[in-house]
Amino acid sequence: MKKILVMLLAASALFAVLAGCGADDASMAETDAPEISTAEPETQAPASAPIALIGGNDEPFTEACREALADWCDANDMDWAGYEPEKDTADARVVAVARAIADGADVIILPGSVFGEVLDTVMEVYPQIRFIALDVSQEDMAKEPASNTACLMFNRAQAGFLAGYAAVREGYTELGFLGDDTRAAARYGCGFVQGADAAAAELGVDIRIRYSCGQISDDSGLTAEAEHWYQEDTEVIFAWGAAEAAALKAAKSKEGRLIGSGAETDSGYYLTAPVMVPGNAVKAVLEALYGDEWDVWCGKITTADGVCAGLDTEIWTMERFTVHDYELVKVQLEAGTIAAEDTALLPEISERTTLMQNED
């Protein structure tokens, strides 16, 4: 029933937009075009733009995609338009997609996992439109991607791997991972364990990793856990999501080190931060689409790793393991010489690593 309602909403939204434009007119003057909402009005293209981006609920992620789209369109002499849903709901996003299509877009970029439910509807209602969905996995959708749809996931385990590897190569042997109850945190944590273990085996050193992901939800509990870890000789904690603010508070009180998204990077507590670069994925898929290589991406979910996942070198404070060392390891990951399994499940580890889960 919900699917039917959403499909009817999409159809009615499209009809309303077209009706408002004047169905009997052979053409519509630019001054009669529907108003387009965007967070960046100074870069918004005319309503007849062939490419549209629908705003998601993660503004930094959306903004990275928006900037990459603007750069690509400038370089390729193409127009684009940005649309913001009126509400943070699937129905509102479907309406935004319908309006973009009514305005002339035939390529729609959807940034964020919240578009999984939207895709279930629009990729069938609009089979002639190409959809590029970023950070949308099969877990977010009820259906397989159609032939007009390309879904890209980011290998957060790769960024986590590099963070864990770097920490151990820097000389830390007492580590911790503290995450919230999200898919992203679990994948970062899995990669972190893989990378730390790989570096420990390579160096021939023994390490310990305290690990908690999703078991603690309140801020006071997360802060208490992080403080306890630091008191128990943990040297650096990789904290993600809701756990990061709590871990930063604990790091400040216990003089610990931190890896996280990069909040308060001038505090001196951060070693580095994992980064996703969705803009590189946007450009790669557009190049394929307009270069007649759409088949490389369409009808499936592809992991966009390599240049799309890594560590922030701008806030780098490590000295023994340098940015140059990091770049060399990243090349090996991109080439497949080293593998970072992208999963939320904890990996098998060597005898060099002791994994301590949910320790009180």
Image (cartoon, rainbow, N blue to C red):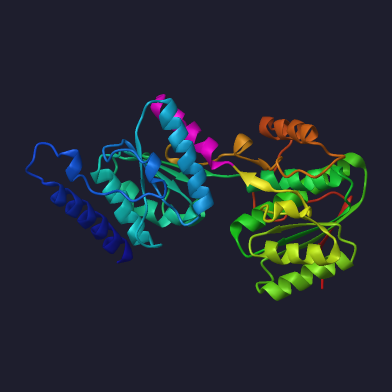
Q: How many marks?
A: 0
Of all residues shown, which one is farthest toward the left? 24
Q: Position of residue 65 (x, y in %)?
A: 48, 42
Dividing the picture into quadrants, the one containing residue 78 is: top left
Horizontal arrangement in the rendering, residue 109 relative to residue 165 (left or right)? left
Q: Horizontal and vertical percent for residue 80?
A: 36, 37
Q: Position of residue 155 (x, y in %)?
A: 62, 44
Q: Nearer the viewer, residue 164 or 1?
A: 164
Whether residue 125 can be seen here: no
Identify the image quadrant of the C terminus: bottom right
**Does the magenta portion include 18?**
no
Which residue occupies the foreground of this view, 169 or 259? 259
Q: Quadrant of the N terminus?
A: bottom left
Q: Residue at x 17, y 52 (%)?
A: 15
User: What residue span does the magenta drawing correspond to?
Assistant: 277-296
Which residue is depicted at the point 41% across and 52% down?
143
Q: Between 250 and 340, which is closer to the camera in this rendering?
A: 250
Q: Residue at x 23, y 45 (%)?
A: 102
Rendered position, 201 above or below 209 = above
Majority secondary structure of magenta residues: helix
- Residue 193 % position (x, y): 77, 52
